[in-house]
DNA sequence: GACCTGCTGCGGTTTG
């Protein structure tokens, strides 16, 4: 009956589209959104019609004759806004209301037109909302005071991230500008913690989750080709070529350098075998226009096959049409990421997804298998949360001060305290942070008011002010006026060096340090580009699953023979630890010259273990892929120390403070943290980088189990 | 052996 509840223009839209029936998530959303003003999280797989599930009832319900912008759609990507624009605009033609794109690359004239005549729907990014608060506070009020609905697309990408905290704060500030409360509808295919998603709206009680758990059939195959050296094994590439040459394919090789290597090498093989030449790479270092061309090609070529070798740039919901196969080379770092990538294929009704998982090392194979098994169990890692985001609060304090061009200190503190993004931060803490901003001249105190201070001007007036993330400095790469991409300056970048970029091979002929430009010409052979990698976090559940695989005798029909052989060999190696309870025990390899602890836990606990080893001056080296500590201490000393590590430390804050002094890059994860008082920097590091609580729980329960006497190596 | 995301306002020049 959902159809009948919709307004006449919307029903006409559905009839014109010749949809035979509405999807389950759409029916649920129509019934609920039309009958209440609650907030909703719509959770269902990719290509299940979530956007329409939100917009059909919202556009039926909202009275656009009232004027003002009534619906705000927020997206993490400009590309997604541009994509959704056409879909939403088509729908809005039936209602005769305008749709306006508002982001950094959107048409300025159209933005000005909206300001003169606020109406309809606006599609925007969080950073553009931030910029409006800073530069156009009066226009913002005039635009949004009548706002009824906020739709947040790909809401999982905001959960637990700094960008998400910023968006939460902006929603809270936006609400304060509106005459009546607006409702929020969040969309996602990969939510790991529904309560976190509900909290995101600022009103957990009145936020309901509508969940469609239906999944697609997936044909998945694991293959193993051991890597020897820096480059991909040629038998892997030959196999990959055979599997992909007659299809529309996305390949995810986990890094930009490797994405180039895969694209160039497959293209070479294809040229030799007289196959198609539609091999592309797609990642943040490929020129934006080139990337748009690749997306356009994939979407609009119905007949020709193609192969795009990419990073997470093609992970979120941008529509690139029909993809028949997804290839993942080595393990993803999260199940959420695996699901997003899977969602890129078999988007049409009735199509299944085809997934190839290649591994080039045994630990990667084990991790990849663990991710696959957890996916089959329905597990998605929950976002890491931070109740007291002091760094984002500091940024928002500057944003409010600038937007108000002078604000009473009490008023500023009050606004920050009332902001639901900063619920858990005390008034006294807010005051300390504001006082510190005055002390470092980021704010200037004039009687009871503050304005932006001398040293804050440059920061607040810069383009970089609106975002929560840092970006590396890049050099533009061009060949005779053709833009190819942008890459960071590494020792590899010098005249006469050959590099791969944008699925082609280039020789560097000139590096202009002043203009930050690299001039190149086509070449025949070259090396993959190098990048300084940041780290991403592995959830402890993945590592626990890896251990579980090692200590069970399950057989997996997705593995080919080579994978089976490798897993069997690893199981045999780990047999020498008599581990009976994988919840409580971890391998400790002791031989005459070394002591190695396999922690099988997540990134944060490993980091914290490392910090505690530092604290007790235990020397070690850490291997992230094996989740293993090589300890420079005897086994007896280690076992004696182990439980002691869990004891509370009265001087841990001083220790962390000293760490920050010695290694300031530890705070590099926070763009705004460097302006905080020291005490808050320590808190930020303790809560966001380390996890002392989880680590104490881990140490208290875990017993290291030493191997039996024979001296075989595990590595 | 590691990913990605976004961006004002102003003054100047060029183009239809």
Image (cartoon, rainbow, N blue to C red):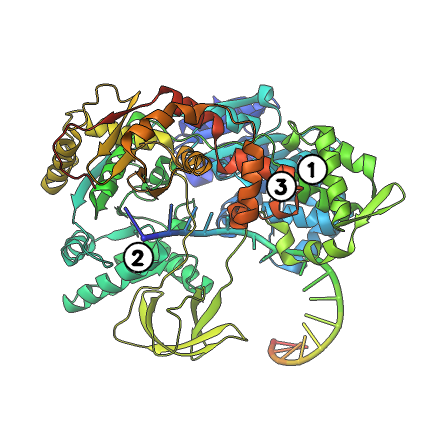
| Chain letter for the residue marked with disc 3 in the picture | A
Q: Is residue A99 visible?
A: no
Asked if residue A280 lies left or right of residue A135, the reply is left
The residue lying at 25 percent from left, 72 percent from top is: A525
| Chain letter for the residue marked with disc 2 in the picture | A
Of callouts 2 and 1, the N-terminal one: 1
Q: Is residue A275 above or below residue A710?
A: below
Q: CA distance from mark 2 to mark 1?
A: 43 Å
**Where does label 1 land, which residue?**
A174
Q: CA distance from mark 3 to mark 1?
A: 20 Å
Of callouts 3 and 1, the N-terminal one: 1
Q: Is residue A645 above or below residue A518?
A: above
Q: How many marks?
A: 3
The foreground one among A164 and A24 is A164
Mark 2 touches mark 1? (CB < 8 Å): no
Of badges 2 and 3, nearer the viewer stands 3
The foreground one among A305 and A239 is A239
**Where does label 2 land, which residue?**
A258
The residue lying at 76 percent from left, 51 percent from top is: A441
Asked if residue A155 lies left or right of residue A680, the reply is left
**Where does label 3 land, which residue?**
A391
The foreground one among A74 and A526 is A526
Q: Is residue A494 above or below residue A349?
A: below
Q: Quadrant of residue A66?
A: top right
């Amino acid at each position: 009956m959902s159809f009948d509840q919709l307004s006449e223009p919307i029903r006409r839209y559905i009839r014109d589209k010749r949809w035979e029936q509405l999807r389950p998530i759409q029916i649920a959303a129509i019934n609920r959104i039309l009958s209440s003003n609650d907030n909703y999280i719509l959770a269902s797989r990719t290509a299940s019609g979530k956007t329409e599930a939100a917009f059909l009832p919202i556009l039926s319900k909202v009275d656009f004759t009232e004027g003002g912008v009534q619906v705000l759609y927020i997206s993490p990507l400009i590309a997604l806004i541009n994509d959704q624009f056409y879909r939403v605009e088509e729908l809005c033609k039936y209602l005769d209301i305008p749709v306006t794109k508002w982001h950094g690359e959107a048409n300025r004239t159209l933005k000005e037109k909206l300001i003169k005549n606020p109406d309809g729907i606006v599609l925007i990014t969080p950073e553009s909302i931030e910029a409006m608060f800073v530069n156009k506070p009066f226009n913002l009020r005039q635009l949004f005071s009548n706002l009824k609905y906020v739709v947040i697309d790909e809401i999982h990408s905001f959960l637990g991230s700094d960008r998400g905290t910023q968006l939460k704060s902006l929603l809270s500030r936006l609400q304060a500008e509106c005459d009546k409360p607006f409702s929020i509808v969040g969309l996602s295919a990969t939510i790991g913690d529904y309560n976190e998603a509900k909290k995101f709206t600022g009103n957990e009680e009145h936020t309901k989750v509508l969940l469609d758990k239906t999944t697609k059939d997936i044909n998945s195959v694991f293959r193993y080709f051991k890597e020897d050296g820096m480059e991909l094994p040629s038998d892997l590439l030959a196999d990959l070529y055979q599997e992909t040459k007659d299809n529309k394919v996305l390949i995810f090789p986990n890094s930009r350098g490797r994405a180039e290597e895969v694209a160039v090498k497959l293209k070479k093989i294809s040229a030799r075998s007289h196959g198609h030449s539609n091999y592309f790479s797609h990642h943040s270092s490929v020129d934006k226009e080139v990337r748009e061309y690749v997306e356009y090609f994939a979407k609009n070529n119905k007949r020709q096959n193609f192969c795009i070798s990419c990073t997470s740039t093609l992970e979120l919901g941008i529509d690139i049409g029909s993809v028949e196969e997804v290839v993942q080379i080595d393990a993803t770092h999260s199940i959420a990421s695996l699901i997003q990538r899977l969602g890129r294929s078999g988007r049409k009704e009735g199509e299944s997804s085809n997934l190839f998982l290649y591994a080039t090392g045994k630990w990667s194979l084990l991790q990849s298998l663990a991710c696959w098994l957890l996916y089959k169990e329905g597990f998605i890692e929950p976002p890491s949360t931070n109740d007291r985001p002091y760094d984002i609060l500091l940024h928002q304090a500057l944003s409010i001060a600038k937007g108000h061009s002078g604000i009473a200190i009490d008023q500023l503190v009050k606004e920050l305290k009332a902001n639901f993004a900063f619920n858990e931060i005390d008034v006294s803490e807010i005051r300390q942070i504001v006082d510190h901003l005055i002390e470092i001249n980021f704010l200037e105190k004039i009687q009871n008011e503050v304005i932006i201070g001398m040293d804050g001007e440059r920061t607040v007036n810069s383009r970089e002010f609106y975002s929560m993330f840092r970006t590396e400095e890049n050099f533009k790469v061009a060949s005779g006026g053709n833009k190819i991409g942008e890459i960071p300056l590494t020792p590899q970048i010098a005249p006469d060096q050959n590099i791969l970029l944008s699925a082609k091979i280039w020789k560097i002929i000139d590096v202009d340090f002043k203009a930050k430009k690299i001039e190149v010409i086509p070449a025949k052979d070259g090396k993959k580009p190098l990048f300084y990698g940041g780290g991403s976090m592995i959830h402890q559940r993945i590592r626990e699953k890896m251990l579980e695989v090692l200590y069970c005798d399950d057989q997996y029909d997705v593995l080919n023979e080579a994978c089976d052989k490798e897993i069997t060999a690893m199981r045999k190696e780990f047999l020498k630890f008599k581990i009976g309870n994988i919840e409580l025990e971890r391998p400790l390899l002791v031989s005459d010259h070394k002591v190695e602890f396999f922690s099988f836990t997540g990134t944060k606990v490993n980091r914290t273990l490392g910090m505690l080893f530092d604290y007790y001056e235990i020397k070690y080296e850490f291997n992230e892929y094996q989740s293993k500590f090589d300890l420079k201490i005897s086994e007896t000393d280690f076992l004696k120390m182990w439980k002691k590590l869990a004891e509370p430390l009265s001087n841990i804050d001083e220790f962390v403070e000293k760490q920050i002094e010695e290694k300031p890059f530890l705070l590099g994860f926070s763009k705004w943290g460097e302006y905080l008082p020291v005490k808050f920097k320590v808190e930020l590091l303790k809560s966001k980088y380390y996890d002392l609580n989880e680590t104490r729980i881990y140490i208290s329960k875990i017993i290291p189990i030493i191997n039996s006497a024979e001296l075989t190596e595990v590595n």
